[in-house]
Amino acid sequence: MSETAMTDAPQRTDSAAATSFKVAVIAPVVALLTFEFVQHPGQVRQPAVLFWIAAVIVVDLIPVPGWGDLQLSLSFPILLGVAIVYSPEVAAVVALIGSFDPRELHHQVSFLKALFNRCQMAASILAGSALFHAFAHASSPWYLLLPAVLLAAIASYAVNTTLVAIDTSLERGVSVGTVLKKMHGSAPYEFLFSYLGLGLFGAVIARFYSLEGVWSVAVFLAPLIFARQMYFRSRALADRLAEQNALLAEQAERLESLLEKEHETVAELREFSRMKGEFVAVVSHELRTPVTALIGYAKTLHQPEFSDDAKLRDEFLDRMVRQGDRLLRLVENLLTAANLESQQLKLSLGRVLFEDVCRETVEGLAAEQGRVDLSLPEELPVLLTDRQLLGRVISNLLDNALKYSPEGTSCELGAERAGSNVRFWVRDHGIGIDPAKVERIFDRFYQVDSSHTRSFRGAGLGLSLVRDLLEHLGGTIEVASAPGQGSTFTVTLPTRHPDAGPAIEFDPEISELAAGG
């Protein structure tokens, strides 16, 4: 970016690499120009040269803010005009002395940084002037002058941009590519072409100076300063607007994402509210039914005419026991669901005989136990698991199977050994499950028959508890079902709970020695 005099804020401390780079640029430029001044002091002291230096200083007193704390100078066309009119060495001296940073007056930039800014401008003008004078001179015809001016502008632009980008990259710890991108804004090609146009403007200044003298340069200064100020400020405004638009687009996207999540949250809350209402209604019904039956049977038994009818009294008592068991299972399921929800369900691992748990669970079904066929082999391993949770799994599976099976039909509870696991299943001959609904049967409060006039009791908690309890026990469950053909729920349970760690195996020889000792 030719025509840029880029400086940092005073609080920045140059790194060793950046300092070394500055010195590497400053030393040869200062040495060359000092030698030239000593050899030809009269050239630099000419009033016209002093005028050009003053013109550059005046223009540089009105910098334009660039990226971060960098600043853009507007003096490039004047310096290029000097590079055309004078020798490369004289043009470089004008750039060195005239490239003025107003922050130098307030000590807002270090001496080393200020000297580097001047020297990199001098180096860029030296390169441009040398290239121009290799092909043309100020009085050359236009067909020679214009290509030479464009080459000089490109050379100055390349040297200045490269030196500034490397120095800024070393100071800020970012890549050179990032610095170049920030320097050129959102329209790098437009930026480059504008400098080529400035090069041609510099040729016009040089030609008018050759023909008309110093006053013609003064005429060009005011419109040049105003035009470049407007260009850079509009360019900065466009870049700022582009950044604001990008920020607004990002914020709009985030807002849209948040709104979408909000809609999802509202939908979930509505679903939870609906499920809560259904749950309260179902549980109220499920609790009221056995409680009403118990109260009714109890009141009936108080009647005098039943005091001597032992058979009818026993029948009523059996029904009360059945309703009490039903009520107890529902309350236990509700408590288990509450413990799972609050993450307060604790494991109690111990040695468990699977067949004993199955028989106890079936016996707990009271009047329903005659509808369960047990198919348990004798070689089942001893489990290391939570007996109570395993019992709740089996109880809920059997309760579900009996609930959806017609009266008078039975269900099967079977098991087998499967390597380091025990596989058991509950098979019924009930209504079956539509394949489209199989994935949902383990959702809490979901029932296959969810209508208000449904035929089957229950709160829709059993199968969801089975799934959640099996996660605590380290097991899995699968379902095979078809409408009208019944369902089979197959559970795979490890013989040792994952939290129990590996089993300790004893060496038989060591055991015999220990026994003999």
Image (cartoon, rainbow, N blue to C red):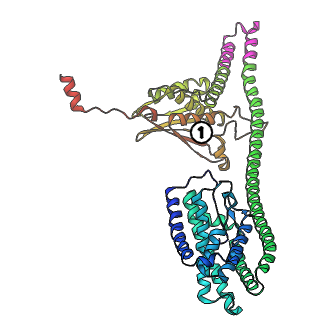
The stretch of residues the image draws in magenta is: 294-320
Residue drawn at x 79%, y 77% as measured from the top left:
220
Does residue 301 show up magenta in the picture? Answer: yes
In the image, taking residue 379 as reference, residue 142 lies left or right, namely right
Name the quadrant of the C terminus.
top left
In the depicted view, which residue is nearer to us: 477 or 346? 346
Image coordinates of residue 214 in percent, x first then y, are 76, 79
| Viewer-closest of 289 and 111 | 111
Q: Residue at x 81, y 77 (%)?
A: 219
Secondary structure of residue under mark 1: loop
- x then y, percent, for residue 19: 52, 59
Task: Based on the picture, tell me whether residue 248 belongs to the magenta stretch.
Answer: no
Task: Name the image quarter holding residue 378.
Answer: top left
Q: Is residue 139 left or right of residue 467?
A: right
**Residue 79: quadrant of the picture:** bottom right
Q: Is residue 408 visible?
A: no
The residue indicated by pointer 1 is 428
* 47 to 470, vertically: above or below: below
- Residue 103: image location, x then y, percent: 68, 57
Q: Residue at x 68, y 13 (%)?
A: 313
Dominant secondary structure (helix, strand or loop) of the stretch shown in magenta: helix
